[in-house]
Image: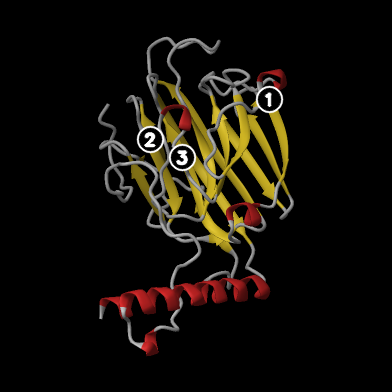
Amino acid sequence: MRNRSTLGTLALMLCCVGAQAQTIDHSNPNTGNDDLIATQSYNWGPVFLGGLCRLTDKGSSEAVSVFSKRQVNITHFENSFVFQILSGGPGDPSDGTGNVADGLTFTIQCMDSAALGGSGGGLGYEGLEHSIAIKFDPTPNSGDPSFSCTGLYTNGQGPFGGIDLLPQGVNIRNQHPFRVDMDYDGRLLQVRITDLVTQATARQSYPIDIAKTIGSPTAFVGFTAATGLGSAAQDIQKWFFTSPPLSDGLREGIWRSRLQGAQSTAKRLGVAKSASAWPTSAGHAPKRIAARKPAYQMKIASATR
């Protein structure tokens, strides 16, 4: 009975995939978080603190991810969020020394809403297959061009190196809030990073077919972050993501792919033939990269440190 019920639920979810514009709206601090899944390698969080999503809390060797509970269309989208990285130690200057580590990413992946990569310089992203990520990195790890850099990474590659933001006047280590705006038209991902205190702005353009890169036109979207020997409080203050409905052709392709997965799953589980045609979530099997605590639903909480 459980197998039939699970397949039937997934079939119902599939019928709704891409049928209408898909929006994730956390631009209002009073917005709930039932549409998100948080996974962490440590016990404290992440949590919402009065509408603020604190990814890491100034502890060392932390890794965290926060993803949408359901997959959304990633063939075209607009995405905006505000982040702030605060020093994990006293008196941190913004000249590349001191204690601000390690950084965060905006990630698109089709593995699992609870997927989580490596800590430290891995930024909670390294090791996540079928994914792309844009990093925001205040820590000069090996290969990084400076203590304020960004870049695009695919399929779980280590987020090292990238683009130096300092020549454009953007220093994400200065503990200011930053707004990130992304626009993707199916071929070119355009990113704008703005310091909300100084108004300095840096722009990047990445030619990429995201659906082809990750192997799916739909995916979970969200954030990863990590600390290592150094630490920081890494906050998402606001987030708004929107994408159009999937085209009929893409929806049919998803249906066929998941139908094949359902038939395979039904055969493996010994489900009755009448149930074997029900779609299930196929594509890439859920895979967790790092050993960690079970996923916790984010809840309103007060800071403990």
Residue 108 screen position, x and y as percent: 54, 49
Within-10-Å neighbours for mark 1: few <14, some 14–19, many 20+: some
Q: Which residue is mark 3?
A: 224
* Left or right: where 56 falls relative to 81: left
Q: CA distance from mark 2 to mark 3?
A: 8 Å
Q: Which residue is mark 1?
A: 200
Who's the residue at 48% across and 42% down the image? 223
Q: Is residue 120 visible?
A: yes
Q: CA distance from mark 3 to mark 1?
A: 24 Å
Q: Are marks 2 and 3 in contact (CB under 8 Å)?
A: yes
Among numbered discs 1 and 2, the one appearing first in the sequence = 2
Mark 1 lies on a secondary structure that is loop
How many dots with numbers? 3
Give the position of the N terminus as an image quadrant: bottom left
Q: Are marks 3 and 1 in contact (CB under 8 Å)?
A: no
Q: Quadrant of residue 22?
A: bottom right
Q: Are marks 1 and 2 in contact (CB under 8 Å)?
A: no
- Looking at the image, is 17 positioned above or below residue 75? below
Mark 3 lies on a secondary structure that is strand
Residue 220 screen position, x and y as percent: 50, 55
Residue 134 screen position, x and y as percent: 59, 38
Q: CA distance from mark 1 to mark 2?
A: 29 Å
Among numbered discs 3 and 1, the one appearing first in the sequence = 1
Q: Which residue is mark 2?
A: 63
Residue 294 screen position, x and y as percent: 27, 48
Q: Amino acid at mark 1?
A: Ala
